Image: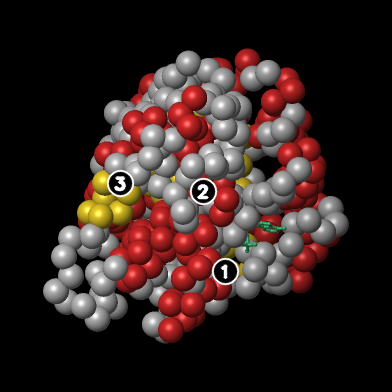
Amino acid sequence: MAGKSHAIVYGASGIIGWALVDQLLSPYPHAGAFSKVTAVTNRPLDLSQSHWPEINAHRPELDLISNINLRHGDGATLANSLKQANADIESVTHVYYLVFSAIDDDLEEVAVNRHMFENVIDAHNLISPNLKFVAFPGGTRGYGIYAPGGTFTPPLQEDMVNDLPSDYAKTVVYPVYREILSTASQGKKWTWCEVCPDAIIGFTPNGSQFSLALHWAQYLSLYAYNNGVGPESKDSNAVAVEVPFPGNATAANALFSPVSSKTLARFMIYASLHPEKCGGGRLFNVADRDEPCTYGEIWPQLAKWFGLVGVGPVETSSASDNTLKVGELPGDTLDLPPGRYITKYRDIFAQCGRANAVSGGVGAGNQQLDSVGYWLTFDRQLSLKKLRQAGFDEDHNPVEGWLESFGMFREAGLIL
Ligand SMILES: NC(=O)c1ccc[n+]([C@@H]2O[C@H](COP(=O)([O-])OP(=O)(O)OC[C@H]3O[C@@H](n4cnc5c(N)ncnc54)[C@H](OP(=O)(O)O)[C@@H]3O)[C@@H](O)[C@H]2O)c1
């Protein structure tokens, strides 16, 4: 019923979670669609630094609950913790689950993330009688892209997930989420869907495990500074400074379908408000536009924002033969790939008064993000046929999401 919907967003500080809360408060899709949003985080988040929309006549009420570690206890423990925090969990109608904990050992990662997900679903099955919809993101990892050279011939289509080789499938948590939801929703009034993004481009106020936009923004920002370019530069007469794509030519030219966190969040909300055509455990690929792009064509536009000239890769790397595993860098890589460059020059952020950039960078995914330009040497574009059939027709230039995020990173003191 319009006006009575209550959304709860788990992982609200993450790259997708932040955008979900932002869009719900905007308010997307329209004023009154939700009356309340409960944002749940693990690490503490200061509302004044959240960069979410301020209170206004059309904004749903916001309740921010931090220090909820989903690894602890079970569904009843979580329900109690939320009650103790005075969360009005009984009235929740829509659950958006954006939590993820990256762990080096794949099977342990599956077990830990399974436990956290079960806790959330069990808690709501216990005490949210008005629950209508649960939405969560999978990702192209679920199409086997972590296997060297990829697994399926693109465009990647939703039904391919059923053909994932079993030894690979057990290293990914998304099939486990599907099983949990299929079982838990039986005989209940709620339904669910999964969305599948490839690289997600977006803002977070205090870092993220896997934000490529933040990773490259911090790199380009420091690179510009060190070469006398940009807002903090002391040299106003700097000449054009080139910055090579951090990868090899094959990866720079491989086709893929990125999505801004805003577009992804909007579709998750749209899907949850159209259970008849998006529920029932359906899976939807989501991207900014139907036409795929390449990192090679995006790179110069990203570099330009920082006053740099983005050029092609330095080397013809030995890694272009699809032998690298996720997170691996070839021996003949750049002297300092982005992550190592950031580590070396991180002090500059503090010297320039950007303390937030020191504490709020990229976490566990640092090395994986460094390898993006080397390991992803194969086409992996998504088919958006099903997304369009569901009636979601937003279409954006993928560079928009990057530049919007860069502006917000600067505003939040995460880059120079
Ligand atoms: N990033 C991408 O480009 C990308 C691409 C495709 C698919 N995906 C998928 O999207 C999903 C979300 O990933 P993301 O990139 O949004 O990650 P993220 O930005 O790192 O966010 C993860 C969220 O999980 C929360 N979290 C982690 N451990 C927790 C715990 N023990 N208890 C409660 N909350 C916890 C984090 O909260 P705190 O920060 O407060 O700890 C954070 O809000 C994952 O399934 C991922 O595979 C991501």
Question: How far apart, in angstroms, are the residues tagged by discs 2 and 1?
Answer: 33 Å
Task: Identify which amino acid the numbered label 3 is placed on.
Answer: Trp
Q: Does residue 255 appear to the left or right of 62 in the view shown?
A: left
Decide: few, some or many residues near mark 1? Use Cα within 10 Å; few <14, some 14-19, many ≥20: some
Above-or-below relation of 14 to 146: below
Task: Identify which amino acid the numbered label 2 is placed on.
Answer: Leu
Above-or-below relation of 99 to 49: above
Q: Position of residue 186 (x, y in %)?
A: 74, 30
In the picture, which quadrant includes the C terminus? bottom left
Q: Is mark 1 within 8 Å of ligand 1?
A: no
**Secondary structure beneath disc 2?**
helix
Residue identifier under label 1: 63
Nearer-the-camera pick, 134 or 179: 179
Which residue does the image show at 27% across and 62% down from the upper left?
A: 306
Q: Position of residue 116 (x, y in %)?
A: 75, 50
Q: Does residue 63 appear to the left or right of 59 in the view shown?
A: right
**Secondary structure beneath disc 3?**
helix
- Front: mark 3 or 1: 3
Q: Earlier in the sequence, mark 2 or mark 3?
A: 3
Q: Position of residue 81 (x, y in %)?
A: 77, 66
Q: Is residue 235 visible?
A: yes
Question: How far apart, in angstroms, are the residues tagged by discs 2 and 3?
Answer: 15 Å
Residue identifier under label 3: 299
**Secondary structure beneath disc 1?**
strand
**Residue 369: mark in rendering:** 2
Decide: few, some or many residues near mark 3? Use Cα within 10 Å; few <14, some 14-19, many ≥20: many
Task: Identify which amino acid the numbered label 1 is placed on.
Answer: Asp
Q: Earlier in the sequence, mark 2 or mark 1?
A: 1
Q: Is mark 2 within 8 Å of ligand 1?
A: no
Question: How far apart, in angstroms, are the residues tagged by discs 3 and 1?
Answer: 38 Å
Q: Position of residue 268 (x, y in %)?
A: 48, 42
